[in-house]
Amino acid sequence: MQRQPLVIANWKMNGNRALVAELSEALQQQQAHYADVTVVVCPPAVLLPVWQAQPGVVALGAQDVNEHADGAHTGEHSLALVHEAGAQWVLIGHSERRQCYGDSEARIAQKLGQVLADSRFTAVLCVGESAEQREQGATFAVVEAQLSEALAQVSACERLVVAYEPVWAIGTGLTASPAQAQEVHGFIRHWLQEKFGSAGAAVQLLYGGSVKADNASELFAEADIDGGLIGGASLQPEQFVAICTAAQARSN
Ligand SMILES: O=C(CO)COP(=O)(O)O
């Protein structure tokens, strides 16, 4: 099954206007090298309109969204607000949201349901185990529980992407080996096919966790790694463009 390569930048709480211009220019100049790759940038929400004003070589995403449509939720952003600011993609359930900002499985399921119910958006569900859970041999059980709770009420997967981000690999410089990552991606693929039938074969699966220009190619060579969710390296235009270029090899 041919799936389009996908690379998503998650700037987290980093970047500024100057970096928008710098990364946007680097991506425009090198676009021929990653012509068949979908590239999405998820900046802090206040920078979405700044990205929106750039020539459109990338799609835009929000790093999170509130589960309510509007109302008294100080500091939060609704789906309608991020859409107005240019976002068509939303990350849901990032491990930093789960660990530090109270995103329970129930809340993640609500957020995901809301995004998938809106045909203007694609949702990127993030899953992954901690170092301790991996040491205990619980990786598959943890990932399976995250998938089944988030997707319990979901019956179609056409606008769903799943990102496997082992918590121990995020921002640590420790990357899952291609074989370790593929093992979990294969598990996720199988789970999606059991739940969604043949449509599960078309869901793009991303690996995230210390992806850099020098390890991207070997990760993206694996059967079920359709691209990457990139943190730190997405703040370095040369690195990020090289990662997008590495993903192009999947369509050659
Ligand atoms: O959390 C991540 C992307 O969402 C990965 O971050 P790093 O690439 O900095 O490890």
Image (cartoon, rainbow, N blue to C red):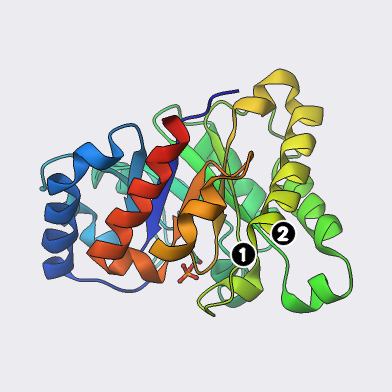
x, y (%) of residue 174?
59, 76
**Residue found 56% across the figure and 25% down from its top:** 158
Say what amino acid the circle numbered 1 marks: Asp
x, y (%) of residue 214?
43, 64
Comparing labels 2 and 1, the label whose residue is closer to the camera: 2
Using the numbered discs, state the Cα–Cα distance from disc 2 to disc 1 in whole angstroms.
26 Å
x, y (%) of residue 199?
66, 21
Q: Is residue 207 visible?
A: yes
Q: Can residue 67 be seen in this view?
A: no
Mark number displayed over residue 4 = none
Q: How packed is label 2: few (under 14 Cα within 10 Å), some, or many (20 or more)?
A: few
Quarter of the rendering containing residue 88: top left
Mark number displayed over residue 180 = 2
* Residue 209 vertical placement versus 182 (above, below): below
Quarter of the rendering containing residue 139: bottom right
**Residue found 66% across the figure and 48% down from its top:** 109
Q: How packed is label 1: few (under 14 Cα within 10 Å), some, or many (20 or more)?
A: some
Assign the C terminus to one quadrant of the image.
top left
Drawn side of residue 106 relative to residue 11, left or right: right
**Residue found 72% across the figure and 73% down from its top:** 130
x, y (%) of residue 112?
58, 44
Say what amino acid the circle numbered 2 marks: Gln
